[in-house]
Every structure is written in C-alpha cells, then in structure tokens.
Amino acid sequence: MRIGLIVGPWFTVPPERYGGTERVVDALARALSDAGHDVLLAAASDSSCPVPQIDGLGRSRPAELGETLSELSHIVRAYRGMGGVDIIHDHTLAGPLYAHRPPDIPVVTTIHNQLTAQSVELYRAMAQDTAIVSISHNQRSIVPGLKISAVIHHGLDLSTVSVGRGDGGYACFVGRMCPDKGPMEAVKAARQAGIPLRIAAKMHAKDEVRYFKDVVQPALGPDEEFVGELSDPEKYQLMGGAVALINPIQWPEPFGLVMIEALATGTPVVATPMGAAPEIVRHGKTGFLGELGQLGGFVNGAAGLDRGECRRAVEEYFSAERMAVDHLDLYSQVIEQFPDKGVPGSAYVHENQRQGP
C-alpha cells in the first residue's frame, strides 16, 4: 500500500521535545514502513523520520503554533505533493476540508485534540467524504451523533524505551505546565505519600510560564524539583526510575500518551479516572485510578505492582505495531468503499477493538 501521512508544520517528526501528535505519526510511519508499505510524509523539512518526505515544506516553526495561515499554506503544498498514493491520512484539522485535495484519493483523519462545539461542526462537515478516527472510546462517546469510522488507540515504538527499575525513590509528573494537567495536584499527592516529586513539563507559551511562576513555583518545597522539559531519552530515564507517574488530569483528555510511555518503562500510573485513563490503566494491576484525595495512598501502593506487567500491557495493547495493523485494516476498508459506496470506512469495526487492557 502507498500511504501518505500529513502532519502540521509546527514541530518536527519526531519532535525534539514537545509534540504528542508528531510522536504518534512518527511511530505510525515507522511501523507502516517496517510492515512493507510505502510511506510518504508531509511534515516540517527538518524532520528526521526515516521515510520519504515531500520537499519544500519548510522547517518547523513552533513560534507559529496554531496560526491559520501557517497551517493552510502547509496543507496546500502537502496535498500538492501527494500524487500517486493510495490513501492519505491527514493529522491536521483543516486539511480534510481543503477543497482542492486530489479527488481520486480517499482521505482518513484522526481527532487528536479535545472536541469542542466549533471542532465538532468541522468534523461533521468533513464526515461526508472523510473517514474519521477517534483515539479513545471516551472521545467517541462525547458526540454520539458524529460519524466515527474507527477507534484506534495510540501506539508507542517500544524499541526506544527500556524498562527501568523504579528504584529512584521519587514519583514523577510529566506533562504541560497548565492547570488541566494537574501539576499542583501531583505535588499534593506526592506530599500525602511522603515521597519526593520530580516535575518535567513543557513550558513555552506565555500562559504556561505565568502559571508556573505565579502558582507552581512558589508552592514547591525541598522535596519537589522542577527539571524542565526533557528529551525522550531523558524522559524515559526519569520515568523508569520513578515509583509511579502521577497524572492527576483535570479534563477529559482524549488519550494521554504520557501514561503508556510510563507503563512502557515499567512504571505504574496513578491518575484521576478522566478521559481515556480507564482505557489505559488497569486499576490495581498497572496503576490506580481515583479521586484526588486517594492519589497519595495509591502512590505508595504502586510500589507493590508488577513492573513487568506494566510493560506487557503496552506490548499487547499500545505498541506501534498494533496501531499500524489497526490503521491498515481501516485503510483497506476505506479504499474498498471509495469512491461511490457511501461514507468511507463507515462500516468499519476492527474485530479486535477493545475498550482497553
């Protein structure tokens, strides 16, 4: 199969540090290529993903994150270079609505972000001729009437992640520096557990810097350490040494890649049961799910969980290979139905789809 992948212009694939979508697309591109398929990637030109890339798209520009013209100009050039593929998997929001995309190539898109009233309106419009992938059952349930062709959980390239010993004597928080991610709640849980906390967080935007300086930094004590934003190897080392990842999310996060990253290092996850967390964490097996007041006790309990079972859960349910297989099944279904057999992928249900591990 000849597969075109499109991702936004702001971060490289894979990202040097922050960039969840770009990290997922990198894992998918590599797994599809390893499975023998031809992958063509439309991404920032300084991307290092080892598949053929469309020329002339320009270097990554994180300072322009979210700017409409930046995304649209990138999309026009990306679709212009996609001739000859069998299917296009567009990971941008605006791309599937581009009126001049190749009419003879079916398109799949993935909902990577939180569904809002405005984005739901856009997805309803594109559902007429685009197969839509949801990244969790929770995300799919938010808008029951929206046509979703498949629920496909994210996957991780496990060849880059080693299992840690969890003997560092600390818990960790890894995420973005904002209230929704719950860094202050992680501090409270670690203090309740009586264990040091190491905080790794992306902090580029003005509101992130302001939240850290005004709220988080003044509250940090001698047992809490802010280690900044880490590269993947640094992040996996931090996670692997932790007793637990504390992930007290305060919003219905559509997936939560950080949780499967921690589990891949063998580290249990202690989280609030919001969004897709119940689809990722097996309570009492690979971590614990509970209300904020319970998390401290769960952090202590995480030390007794089997780190090997945490890793096995990712190998079975959240590997890049599994993600690629599920996407290939959808791609085949979409191509078979295209162009005049109804909404692409509308009848697709993967026989191995599960609610979670």
Image (cartoon, helix red, strand yellow):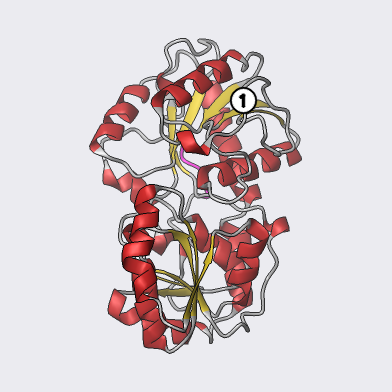
Q: Residue at x 52, y 43 (%)?
A: 21
Residue 322 position, x and y percent, is 61, 49
Residue 139 seen in the figure: yes
Above or below for 147 versus 260 = above
Q: Is residue 244 visible?
A: no
What residue is shown with label 1? 58
Q: What secondary structure prevails in the magenta region?
A: loop
Query: Could you tell whether 48 is left or right of 167 in the image?
Result: right
Q: Quadrant of residue 252?
A: bottom left
311, above or below 69, in the image: below
Taking the spot 52% from the left edge, 48% from the top edge, the residue there is 20
**Residue placed most toward the observer, 58 or 313:** 58
Residue drawn at x 38%, y 62% as measured from the top left: 212
Which residue occupies the extreme bottom position in the image? 194
- 274 in relation to 74, above or below: below
Q: Is residue 87 magenta?
A: no
Q: Which residues are magenta?
A: 348-352
Q: Quadrant of residue 28?
A: top right
Where the N terminus falls, by quadrant?
Answer: top right
Q: Identify the element where label 1 is drawn.
A: loop
Circle 1: residue type: Gly
Q: Residues within 10 Å of mark 1 (few under 14, many from 20)?
A: few
**For this rendering, which residue is in front, 136 or 182?**
182
Q: Report x, y in % for residue 41.
A: 64, 29
Q: Picture coordinates of residue 140 (x, y %)? A: 34, 44
State the residue lying farthest toward the left.
117
Question: In the figure, 285 relative to 148: above or below?
Answer: below
Q: Quadrant of residue 159?
A: bottom right
**Picture mark count:** 1
Percent position of residue 123, x then y: 34, 29
